[in-house]
Image: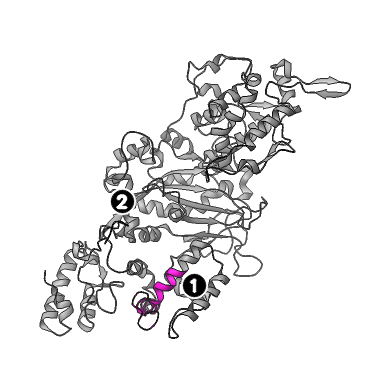
Amino acid sequence: MDRSWIRNSKPGDREYDAGVRQFINFAVKNSGGREKLPCPCHKCHNLLHKRVDEILNHLTKFAFDNTYTCWIWHGEKMDETHVVKPKNNLFEEENVVEGDNLEDMLHVAQDKFNDDPSKFERLLSDSEKPLYTGCKKYSRLKAILKLYNLKAANGLSDKGFGDFLELFKDMLPEENVLPERTYEAKKTLSTMGLRYEKIHACPNDCMLYWKEHESLSNCPVCNASRYKKKEGVPAKVLWYFPIIPRFKRLFSNSGDAEKLTWHANGRKKDGKLRHPADSPQWRFIDAIYRDFSKEERNLRLALSTDGMNPFGSLSSTHSTWPVILVTYNLPPSLYMKRKYMMLSLLISGPKQPGNDICVYLAPLIADLKKLWEQGVEVFDAHRNETFMLRAMLFCTIQDFPAYGNLSGYTVYGESPCPICEDGLKGKWLTASKKNVFLDNRRFLPDDHPYRKRKRSFNGEQEFRGRPKVLTSEEVFKKVEHIHTTFGKKNKASLPKQGYKKCSIFWSLPYWRHLFVRHCLDVMHIEKNVCDSLVGTLLNINGKTKDGQNARDDLKEMGIRNELHPVKKNDKTYLPPASYTLSRREKKEFCESLAGVKVPEGFSSNFSKLVNMETLKLVGLKSHDCHVLMQHLLPIAIRSILPKIYDVPLLDCVLSSTSYTVKSLILKF
């Protein structure tokens, strides 16, 4: 199709008018029924969407954009003449449009400027204005964007970045237009930034002032004021970062758009579990939702949340909860990178939301329902086409306390397991004042030798099978009629055990069909097990599980007679157990860990974590605990192996995996 008229004619010429009619017919034919289309005039640059009659009016008054010869924004596939080919083998990048992807970013962000076109015109002017007279490589907007990316990537402070801008501006020719203050740079880029919403919330977590409640000034549940003493200052705020514009921007980058189909095109499919796409749940979703799985660009997401103190203090008196989305379409090396982890909600403190977290998840769930039921129109920069994007929440990832908040099950007390429920009962220890669970052997294979051992456990053999696990449909039938009034003032009405609410996740149409809805973060479990195990071995005060209360409980249960406390001269003596180490053995154990040398990046330097004076391990991070449990502990304990070999817990350590971790994995 001849398009020489774009460069060789102007409005009013017969050739130009014929070409415009040809373009309008092509655009309408490929519009897919859309009312508004990108306008390709020299003023709009395909960044503003207009009706067809408005586009025709613009093209009559203003010239056609002479760089727009391949009509990719109107349904045309890109041919080889519009692709940059690598000049050598130092990099591989296919289907990259000539120039910079800044135009693609502007194209995605242009929806923000429909109400205020003047802002867009200023942004467009900055994108075309050379950094200085004669500069052809960098415009003002591109230079600011590149420099600010360096600031963010290297953690440079605002003051440091301002000093850098001032010095760099002085180095450039005098007529340059680079801003000299951080404030100016931020003000320029803020118009391109993705929007966020500040939604007021009841200070008692009863409700959000959102949708039909947006105009209220007092909570209809607890009658608490929406504002602080000063009128207009909200008592509590939820920060919501809408996910749909962020997905659109992700697909606007050609490289990212290609990576989002890795699970379908780049994954090695040999039956081994390397990625969530290899799981039975992924295949089950493909089977029952064929319309969803047919489009390989549809997203499968994981939600993760936990409490933190954003003020750099280890104090637990403040708890802010970020809610992060992870995209499982990406390869394993990328989907846990910060670049692709999407902050969707920020629930402000100082108190954690607890059971009322469903109140704050409502805006996110509303967008997830829209992405599942309707989908949104998204431009794929890699394939140069528009498609209807849909997404689903594949699972959640959290520690055990947050598991209870998200699922609505009480994770403490006599029956704290959301999987086993009443099938796994705890035993109350009078002296220790806690519930313990002695039935973990039920999850072992039927022929496992631990099932027949009495002395090493609770004095009984265990031949029962694992408790029945309810399906998602069965769980939904139990919770669908539970009505909960949210809010911190309504805690007394919640049940003490079992399900206390119907989680907001059940409103997602596909949630009741998932095999695994909530996943535990093993990092927390493994660290807790490691701290308890090492603390018991080294008899660290506050970490050991072998103390006066534990021995009194053994006596009350009538097991391990040789470990019962003995009173001598008004003093209580605790007989040493088989795992009790002498000072010489503790020293050998610590010396073996202190002498370990590992490759750089494998773990922390253990010589700095071992205190030879107090014979303790201090400052262990979660990854250090993983390395210790899986690799180092079996080696460090060999020198004292004959003495403690008959203890099941340490016997399992020698096989590089804790028995407790094994049982937890079997359960969850």
Is residue 345 toward the left or the right of residue 370 in the image? Answer: right
The residue that appears at 25% across and 69% down in the rendered structure is 37
Is 29 placed above or below 591 here? below
Is residue 73 toward the left or the right of residue 402 in the image? Answer: left
Is 576 placed above or below 384 here? above
| Classed neighbour count for the residue bearing mark 2: other residues with Cα under 10 Å, few (<14), some (14–19), many (≥20) | many
- Residue designated by label 2: 297
Nearest the viewer among 156 and 662 is 156
Q: Which residues are magenta?
A: 118-147
| Classed neighbour count for the residue bearing mark 1: other residues with Cα under 10 Å, few (<14), some (14–19), many (≥20) | some
Is residue 179 toward the left or the right of residue 65 in the image? Answer: right
Task: Give the secondary structure at mark 2.
Answer: loop
Is residue 226 toward the left or the right of residue 280 in the image? Answer: right
Query: What amino acid does circle 1 point to?
Result: Lys
- Residue designated by label 1: 186
The residue that appears at 53% across and 45% down in the rendered structure is 600
Please tell me in which quadrant of the rendered image residue 455 appears.
top right
Query: What amino acid does circle 2 point to?
Result: Arg
Nearest the viewer among 326 and 486 is 326
Any mark on residue 294, and which? none
